Each structure stands twice: as structure tokens, then as C-alpha cells.
Amino acid sequence: MKNISKDSLLTIPVALPSLPEQRKIADILTTWDEALAKLDALIDAQERRKKALMQQFLTGKMRFPEFKKRWSRVSLGDVAENVADQNKGRMGTSSLYGVTKTDGMVPMRDHVKGESFHRCKRVETDWFAYNPMRVNIGSIARWRGTETVMVSGDYVVFRCHSGKLLPAYLDHLRKSWMWQSFVTRGGNGSVRVRIYFSDLAEFTFPCPPVDEQRQIAAILDTADQQITLLRTQRAAIDQQKRGLMQRLLTGKVRVKPV
């Protein structure tokens, strides 16, 4: 309701339990709030732990004892390549995806799809795609699906060189402070930053051997899984609390005061 007046607001009837019952309801909902607060603190701690692990593992400050070989410093262009394979009518509308910062690669909504898919670019499993005007704010994703899909022809698509850089390792590296610092500074254009693969290829980073990359990625994957599990638990508890509020604050469920 827009522009509701104070007088109108004061005429709205509300269910009002007795004060003892109000206290009991408040106590019950406070218990749920405390559980949510504890989960928030745990999620925050796990996210800080993940950042610390990235700081140690992605720089070589912490290493597995079985690996002794010195890391080389490489450019992304040395271990990955641009892919510009156009669709040319091979796939239809259901295969068109976009990239978002929060959800990665997601199916494109019908109302934003263009008329032609001829220019769209093919994306296979473990390839990366991004909008060159939005990669600086984190809109880049690795395609984890098993089927081949396509993205807008304006996107940049690239893949890692097998035996040199694991997609799983790069997926963590792109979330690091090193990557963010580079894409914040890089790119072309005076109004909106455009970062094409030729720009991204200049990103340099310490690169461990592939076997070590695999173990580092596994450790960081586990940290991500723990955070995802906690977030799922939090969402479930929050939903339960909302359902409980709906019942307690309307009188559909009554509680007996102590």
C-alpha cells in the first residue's frame, strides 16, 4: 500500500495476545534468532578461514610436504587460450546461458534473449565465460555442466591448457585478491571497463605443478562445501522461523504462558 496515512494505519486490526503469552512467543522466536546469529558467526568464521587458506596455498607459503618443485610464475595467456567457436545454428534457445556474479552460468530468461543465435559462442565443460564489461565486478564463471551450451557472442570464452592449468584451480584463483587486483586495474575503455582475453592473458601468478594444483583445489573445494552446507542450514532455519511467526503471531498456534 503506497502513501498509507497514519490514521489509516491505526485502524488496522491486529491479533493481540495477553502479555504473558506475548512474552512466551517472544522467548520462542528469540531462540530461533539466537540460532541464526550463531550460524552467521560460524559462516563468517569459515569464510575468513577460506580466505586464509587461499592466502597461504595460492602463494606457495603453505605447501604439501610431498611437493618440492619450485613454482614458476606464468601469464594466464601461457596456460589458457581464447575460444571463439560460434554456434552457427547448432544449438537452440534452451542452450543459451548468461553469467551472473552470484549464481555463475544460468539459463538466459526468455525476455532478454536476442533474435539470432548465429553469433553465440560455444561453451564446453570446464571452460570459462564472462562479459568483458562485467568481469571486473566478478561476473565470470566456469561451466560445470556436462552438456555443451552457448553464451552471447559479446562474451569472452576461454579454456585452460590441459597439463598446465586445472580449471578447478583457476576457479579458486579467480576469487583471490591477486585476480581482483588485476581486473580492477586492467581493461580498455574510458566509461565502462572492457577486459578482453588479450587483457586477461597478461595476468601473472605463481603456478604450481598440476598434481599440486589438484590437491590445493581439493582443499579449497572442501572449504567451499562446508560454507555452502552452513548457508543451506541457515536458509532452512530462517524459513522455519518465518513459518513459526506466521502461526504464532496470528494465533493459529497458541502457547501456554509459564
Image (tube, rainbow, N blue to C red):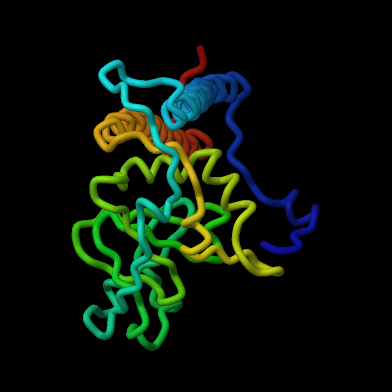
> Residue 124: x, y in percent?
25, 62
> Residue 31: x, y in percent?
50, 20
> Residue 118: x, y in percent?
33, 85
137 or 14, which is in the foreground?
Answer: 137
> Residue 60: x, y in percent?
43, 26
Q: Quadrant of residue 148?
A: bottom left
- What is the tally of numbered marks visible in this picture? 0
State the residue lying farthest toward the left.
146
State the residue lying farthest toward the top.
258
**Is any atom of residue 236 visible in this view?**
no
In the rendered image of this protein, does residue 1 appear above or below residue 95?
A: above
In the picture, which quadrant includes the N terminus?
A: bottom right
**Residue drawn at point x = 19 percent, y = 63 percent:** 147
In the rendered image of this protein, does residue 80 appear above or below residue 37?
A: below
Left or right of residue 60: residue 13: right
75 or 10, which is in the foreground?
Answer: 75
252 or 84, which is in the foreground?
Answer: 84
**Residue drawn at point x = 31 percent, y = 47 percent:** 167
**Residue drawn at point x = 40 percent, y = 31 percent:** 227
